[in-house]
Amino acid sequence: MKRIFTVFILSIVFISLATPIHAGRKQEVLGVATPASEVNFPPVTSGPGIFLPGTLLFPLDQAFQAVRLALATDPISRARIHSSIAGERLAELRIMFERGDEEGIDTTLRLLTKEMNQAALKLSEAKANGASSEETQELAGELNEQLKIQRQILATLEDQTQNSLKLRVATARQQLREAKLEVEDSLPEGALKREIEAGLNEDLAENSQRAQQSVDRLQGDLEMLRLQLEESQIRNLEEREQVLERAISEREEQLQERGVDPIEEEGIVIEESDIEDALESVEEAQTNIEEIRQVVEEAQKLGRDSATFSN
């Protein structure tokens, strides 16, 4: 009986230790979404417009920008106006994040990508209309640098956000990538080669990062599964111990009522049998845990291989 009680007590202690570990690991796996207002937004050089997106007077700001575009005489000028408006939108995006206004973030991201895509289109239009190579290349260089800064800022935001907000930022960053590819076509040959190489390196780094993130999520899921299995095995063992304990107690009571010493009768036989069953349950749990641990090690090896590939 002492050995049974020892296993039973150890099971309770292990459960009490495993529960907070499981809760902490679950939080680590699922992640805690950073509120938009707590995101560390990188500095921007432009200032916001007079009226912010989402306010009642914001249409006046859009009307003013439309007048500016209508008065521009050529695609080069219009491209620079779109670029200027995009600078305002980026500053406004920072304000939206500071306020934690997710609807405003959506609107501003959409307007930012719209302006930069329009700037890229006007650059292509100027090139098609016979604008000088010097003019188009100079504008392409300006827009390309602006797009790189914008995408770097969005990449920083993407790393700090979670769930749907992270997806919206990532989508906007991809849309700016499309505008950048169009702008790159008007760069001088040497600059174009550098941007192509930089783009390939960026794609490789992002793919490696996504692979590592997938491995990390897999490792987290497997760790949770391992802990859940351990807890399940312990709970089953605990229940089994309780049932066995009740059965032994009832048997002892029956023997005592008959005036028979339980130890002399068959208590020892029952005790040894119960201990063997308990030990078999423990061995089975250890086998299952070892199998999961091997899967976790395989996932970790995959993560190391992915990191080596990215370097």
Image (cartoon, helix red, strand yellow):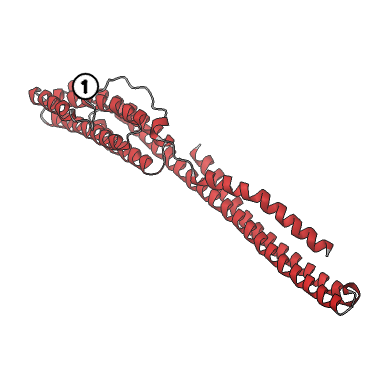
User: Is there any visible trace of residue 131 in the rendered image?
Assistant: no
| Viewer-proximal residue among 103 and 29 | 103
Residue found at x 46% / y 42%: 208
* 101 vs 43: above or below: below
Name the residue type under label 1. Answer: Ile
Q: Residue at x 51, y 36 (%)?
A: 311
Write down the quadrant of residue 39 in the picture. Answer: top left
Q: Is residue 59 left or right of residue 23?
A: left
Q: Position of residue 131 (x, y in %)?
A: 13, 25
Q: Is 265 on the left or on the right of 118, as rendered?
A: right
Q: Quadrant of the N terminus?
A: bottom right
Classed neighbour count for the residue bearing mark 1: other residues with Cα under 10 Å, few (<14), some (14–19), many (≥20): few
Which residue sits at x=19%, y=30%? 56
Residue 156 at what x, y percent from top left? 40, 31
Residue 225 x %, y %: 57, 55
Question: In which quadrant of the rendered view does residue 244 lie?
Answer: bottom right
Residue tagged by mark 1? 50
Farthest residue to the bottom: give it.
Answer: 258
Does 136 sit above or below residue 203? above
Relative horizontal placement of residue 215, taking residue 129 as reference (left or right)? right
Can you say whether 112 is above or below 270 in the image?
Answer: above
Q: Is residue 231 above or below residue 42?
A: below
**Rendering coords of residue 108 (x, y %):** 26, 33
